[in-house]
Image (cartoon, coloured by chain):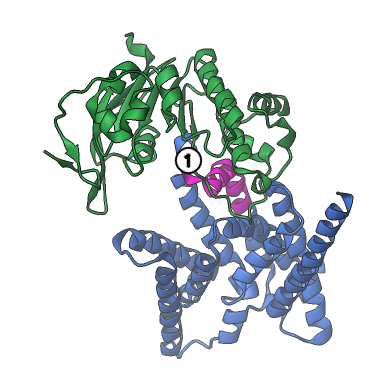
Chain colours: A green, B blue
Amino acid sequence: MKKNNLLVKLNNAGVFREEKWLVKGVSLEINKKEIVTLIGPNGSGKTTTGKIVLNIIEPDEGTVKINTSRVAYVPQKINIDWAIPLRVIDFMNMTSKLNKFEIRNCLQLTGVDHLTYKNLLNLSGGEFQRVMIARAIAKNPELLILDEPVQGVDFNGEIKLYNLIKEISDKLECGILLISHDIHFVMSSTDHVICLNGHVCCSGTPQDVAKNPAYIELFGETAASAISLYRHDHNHTHNQDGSISK
Amino acid sequence: MILDDFFTRALLAGIGMAIVAGPLGCFVIWRRLAYFGDTLAHSGLLGVTIGFILNIDLSLSVFVISGIIALLLIVLQKKTKLAGDALLGLLAHSSLAIGLVFIAILTTIRFDLMGLLLGDILSVTTNDIIIIWLGGSLILLVLFYIWKSLFAATVSYDLAKAEGMNPDVSNYIFTVILAGIIAISIKMIGVLLITGLLLIPPAMSRNFSTSPIQMMFFSIIGGILSVVIGLFCSLELNTPSGPSIIVASLMLFIISLFFKKGMTIVQKSKI
């Protein structure tokens, strides 16, 4: 792997808040043209890990190295105060400088160009999510971080958006960190899967991870059968809060 | 000379104040800083007394004290787990109290306490007008410079931070210019009413704005109208000028509510 392709490198990163490690010992690399996925149950530290990669949270342990300044982020949730009159077009331009044509183009990609002059508050959850993805694409990023990007999007749209994400990574040659629950997409289209539960449970190519007993325990047999499975002994079990009991 | 007329001076000072207060007030509303503005204003009283004691320019001392209180707040927020509004109350009332205690001790200086609390726009000097227009231009210039990053940080801190907009820096700068407008307008409108001038015109403006820039623009118009109407009423009815301006802005706000209702009805009838 060529060195100049490396966009982000996390080495043994951990975040400690309110007398508890939110995540600990996370190491990962994201390269250009690569889709890395984080999977894991609620509260397993996926979003926190994303925020370390984004430089929003500084890790209390370990190191982060970010090699790019062209970053775009689709956060899991954003609450916009009613007091801010914010139209889609203003939102698209919020952290970048785009002309109307570019904005329309990107909104068209996610199928929401008819909403250009609508107030963000009047959008449905799915429409909002599409606008968020369009905004991220419009930034022409080198590194794109998507936190549950298709939540609230209808079934057909979901498949289209996932295909679009795949396309973007090829077209823009950017690295993508995807936080997703969608096992099928994760298994079919990503290059590297990291299974998180307060720490890295297992990681590797989708095929490897699907066979890993830690993964099977976290997600159940149905999810695992998406590819194939055979059991191994596994070296640790989790308590309810995600901590490890040997 | 035209500036010899006290009423013209009041109009000039008030309009200058309104032009700066509009855009800043929008951010105060968007960022839910209403009580923060109040705290800075309350600390202004302490700033004035300290200015008297050290015999320095009052706008300068108010600016410095408000700035210190704002920084203190940021430090306290990190040190204690007390909720933000409780901390603000603590700072607002203790600085107000210290200011009042100082005033009582300073028996040698005659103090117009009512003037400090409610402001006295009719007594502004040409010098005050220069401070308002120069200081105000500087504040707007800074705001223009940090506008993009401040606005992004207002909508979503995480997005702004992730996408390289330096939200922390713009947040600090915003705090400083907020202290700035309080410093230049405390003499005109007083400790108790400054936040009203910051908040009410943008609140009115929100009712018929569809974009952030529009909301700022209408806030400025609303602020100027409030100053003009308030001052004329105060002249005609012999009411105190500061409160009259705020009452005028409240009237505009109430009218804007009907306007909004009318717009909704028009929209519905189209469908």
Q: Quadrant of residue B206?
A: bottom right
Q: Quadrant of residue B223?
A: bottom right
Is A43 left, or right, of A77 in this rendering? left
- Above or below: residue B76 compared with residue A8: below
Crowdedness near tag 1: few (<14), some (14–19) or many (≥20) residues, C-alpha within 10 Å: some
The chain ID associated with circle 1 is: A
Residue with the most extreme left position: A246
Q: What's the magenta region? A: B138-160
Is B200 left, or right, of B269 in this rendering? left
Q: Quadrant of residue A213?
A: top left
Q: Which residue is found at the position 69% from the left and 68% from the top?
A: B126
Residue B12 horizontal/vertical position (percent): 75, 65
Q: Which residue is mark 1?
A: A76
Judging depth in this view, the residue of B53 and A53 nearest the camera is A53
Residue B109 horizontal/vertical position (percent): 49, 86
Q: Which residue is found at the position 62% from the left and 62% from the top?
A: B131
Residue A82 horizontal/vertical position (percent): 63, 55
- Local SS, label 1: loop
- Above or below: residue A72 compared with residue B62: above
